[in-house]
Amino acid sequence: MEKDILIQFGERIRSLRISNKLSQEELANKTGFHRTYIGLIERGQRNLSLRNIEVFSKYFNLTVNELMNFENDKN
Amino acid sequence: MEKDILIQFGERIRSLRISNKLSQEELANKTGFHRTYIGLIERGQRNLSLRNIEVFSKYFNLTVNELMNFENDKN
């Protein structure tokens, strides 16, 4: 069964954060989100909005389409 | 200046709907959304959630990443 999209998105953010050598706190500071929100997103516990998705794509310098490319998560 | 992401997403949904020869009402019935919600999304007036984005990707048989590929909107 296909993994829940919130979990896929959370894993994507986590993988990008780690490959950028950032803590959740640092990513929170850079995106303007609260640290706990970053944690909740990474655990697939937030159904975030398109605008918030765009905040991440802009921060990681990806298009929203590239950000949502969960298959090759080796970015 | 880059077009607002809600407008880009709305245009994408509209373009997919039209290429599938559906009215807003028909798309609403097929996705379970209200017709007015479809209209608001198409006009870029709704900051929809990831789960609602996934409803559209599943209906149009696209991955979320393909759905969010606004550049080549000639699907």
Image (cartoon, coloured by chain):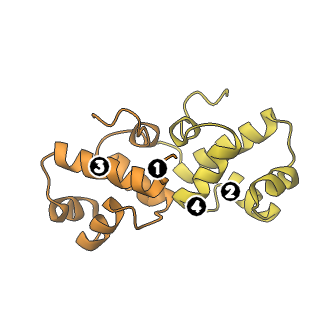
Chain colours: A yellow, B orange
Question: What residue is drawn where x is 76% and y is 57%?
Answer: A39
Q: Position of residue B43 (x, y in %)?
A: 33, 62
Few, some or many residues within 10 Å of mark 1 (<14, 14–19, 20+): few
Q: To which residue does mark 1 refer?
A: B3
Among all residues in the image, which is located at the extreme front? B1
Decide if residue B67 is on the left or right side of residue A61. left
Q: Mark 3 Cα within 10 Å, few/some/many (few <14, many 20+)?
A: few
The chain containing the residue under callout 4 comes to A
Nearer the viewer's eye, disc 3 or disc 4?
A: 4
The kind of residue tagged 3 is Tyr
Residue located 80% across and 56% down the image:
A28
Q: Which mark is residue B26?
A: none
- Vertical comparison of B35 with A19: above or below: below
4 and 2 marks in contact (CB < 8 Å): yes
What residue is shown with label 2?
A41
- Judging from the image, what secondary structure is the residue with disc 4 in? loop
- Residue identified by numbered label 3: B59
Disc 3 is placed on an element classified as helix
Q: Position of residue B33 (x, y in %)?
A: 30, 68
The lab-note entry on whether marks 3 and 4 share a chain reads: no
Dot 1 or dot 3, earlier in sequence: 1
Same chain for mark 1 and mark 3? The answer is yes
| Helix, strand or loop status at disc 2 | helix
